[in-house]
Amino acid sequence: MSEYSQSQSVGIVAPQTARFSEPLALRSGAFLADYELVYETYGTLNADRSNAILICHALNASHHVAGTYADEPDNVGWWDNMVGPGKPVDTNRFFVVGVNNLGSCFGSSGPLSINPATGKAWGADFPLVTVEDWVDAQARLADHLGIAKFCAVMGGSLGGMQALCWSIRYPSRVAHALVIAAAPNLSAQNIAFNEVARQAILSDPQFSDGHFSEKGEKPRLGLRVARMIGHITYISDEQMAEKFGRQLREGLKFSFAPEFQIESYLRYQGDKFAEYYDANTYLRVTKALDYFDPAAEHGGSLAKALAPASAKFLVVSFTTDWRFSPERSREIVKALIDNRRDVAYAEIAAPNGHDAFLLEDPRYLATVRAYLNRAMS
Amino acid sequence: MSIRRDYSVIADWINPGSRVLDLGCGDGTLFKLLADTRQATGYGIEIDDDKIPLCIANGVNVLQRDLEGGLRDFDDQSFDCVILSQTLQAMRHTELVLTEMLRIGREAIVTFPNFGYWHVRMQLLMGRMPVSDDLPYQWYDTPNVHLFTIADFDALCEKKGYRVISRQVLAGDTPVIALANIRGSLAMYRLTRS
């Protein structure tokens, strides 16, 4: 697939920081007195400011959507196959904004940043933030960038939930919402997986009620198990069978050392994640997922929740995604049909499970490309 | 590009500003024609992966799903017209699809290749399964599971209590008036519940 090769990367990019001093009221009732959002932009905002696309990230990603850093040439953005010159989100035409959400550990205000009230890191004291809070903060970033209305707000998984939330919360500020591999809320099973992941962290002796960094510690074991659990839900049974099957590393040892390839793969993923991710952030992001449920305020009617939305929609699901299955996307489509909204829906027969939204499937990329071409024409 | 004769007949049957559901909308050419010339709004349904980006490029609200069982999401009488263009013969549950069409739509447009066409009859007389412009498949690779004639469809409409608002039969691009079940290769019906 040379079409999507590195030669069409946005190249070297640099994050920017926007500081906001007007307090942000959070859904929990708490306030953030002031906060920072880290973001990246690619492409050029046109004269009438009509070509901006906001990219919302999922659980463990960030504002680094595309390109690389001058001092970290291997640190390629998480959606680099989607965003770049000539790519489906074509930076020759669109002004693309990637933003790091509040509560994250990649630069925006969160548990790792300094609480101005105490002069120390927020740690466990950083408030719980929701998808609605993220979207409100993103809207302020849009104000800061002079973007009254996005041509599109898009994201996969939790990012897709933010796009959905944008269409409800700021209907006049979104022309198109691209909701990919998402769900209108989490099922009991989804919440159950999140809860097991949280328990792994909360019960790690090094978690210290979230105040681990003051002690110079880190709940690595908890984070590692949390990531292992999460990772299982991101890939399909089919893909796991194909990639690992029952392959052994060196034959049976009759011990608890990793013997099957899948065990060593999960341990590797867990170890890697525990190094770069923050436990307090993980707890908060999984809670934001659990809390998201726009229909709840409308007696469980997603159609009523989506009634204010005026955007046109592209909804995409992947057949082997069992975390947010196609049925969940069809619920969103049904609610949009009930409101007579413009919606296109693609159900991509990809083998990769939930992770498919990050991968290079030509049918998927062609669908997004066609949709955004149409959006700009 | 010239407009297909059957598409222009369908466009003539769509009232301006109608809400339309096009079942098996392909690359969205028909829906785009109806949107452009009749200001139709609504959705197209298509199962084929490769057609989805083409529909989107044509500005069609395409929903990727199977027609059989995929119509439950649409409320009763929520469309002015539901179209099934040259697809009924490939449906497994023929009656159910027709019932669903007139549950969802006030009117239905159904077009199908006429198995009573003289050319088809000739090939059968010669002992072979027919292959033609409207039935372009060999018996072993055809998606068509229910082949039927104009007379068969008339009988089904009568059984189901459907009223034929309009009927147009074509032989190639030419309208056929007399002996339609012999001279017509493509039949087009505009139906409602009586």
Image: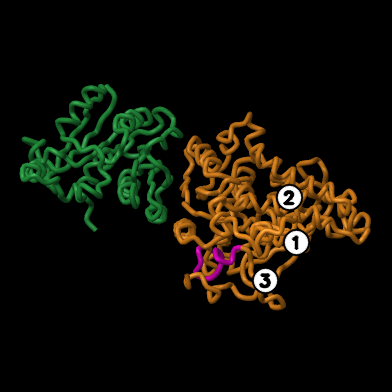
Chain colours: A orange, B green
Q: Is residue A337 left or right of residue A184?
A: left
Q: How many marks?
A: 3
Dot 2 or dot 1, earlier in sequence: 1
Q: Which residue is mark 3?
A: A75
Badge 3: residue crowd in 10 Å (few <14, some 14–19, many ≥20):
few
Label 3 residue SS: loop
* Residues marked 3 and 1 touching at CB (< 8 Å): no
Dot 2 or dot 3, earlier in sequence: 3
* Residues marked 2 and 3 touching at CB (< 8 Å): no
* Residues marked 2 and 1 touching at CB (< 8 Å): no
Q: What span is in magenta?
A: A79-88
| Residue type pointed to by label 2 | Val
Q: Which residue is mark 2?
A: A285
Looking at the rendered image, the disc whose residue lies closer to the viewer, 2 or 1, is 1
Q: Is residue A65 left or right of residue B161?
A: right
Most foreground residue, A235 or A167: A235
Most foreground residue, A365 or A216: A216
State the mark number for residue A271.
Answer: 1
Label 1 residue SS: helix
Badge 2: residue crowd in 10 Å (few <14, some 14–19, many ≥20):
many
Is residue A86 within the magenta segment? yes
Question: Can you give x and y, in whole percent of width and height, for residue B20 in the image?
Answer: 36, 39
Question: Can you give x and y, in whole percent of width and height, for residue A317 in the image?
Answer: 52, 49
Up/down of A249 relative to B169, above or below: below
Dot 3 or dot 1, earlier in sequence: 3
- Identify which residue is drawn at 30% across, 37% down: B15
Residues flagged by tags 2 and 1 on a common chain: yes
Distance in Å between CA atoms under marks 2 and 3: 23 Å
- Identify which residue is drawn at 38% across, 31% down: B104
| Residue type pointed to by label 3 | Asn
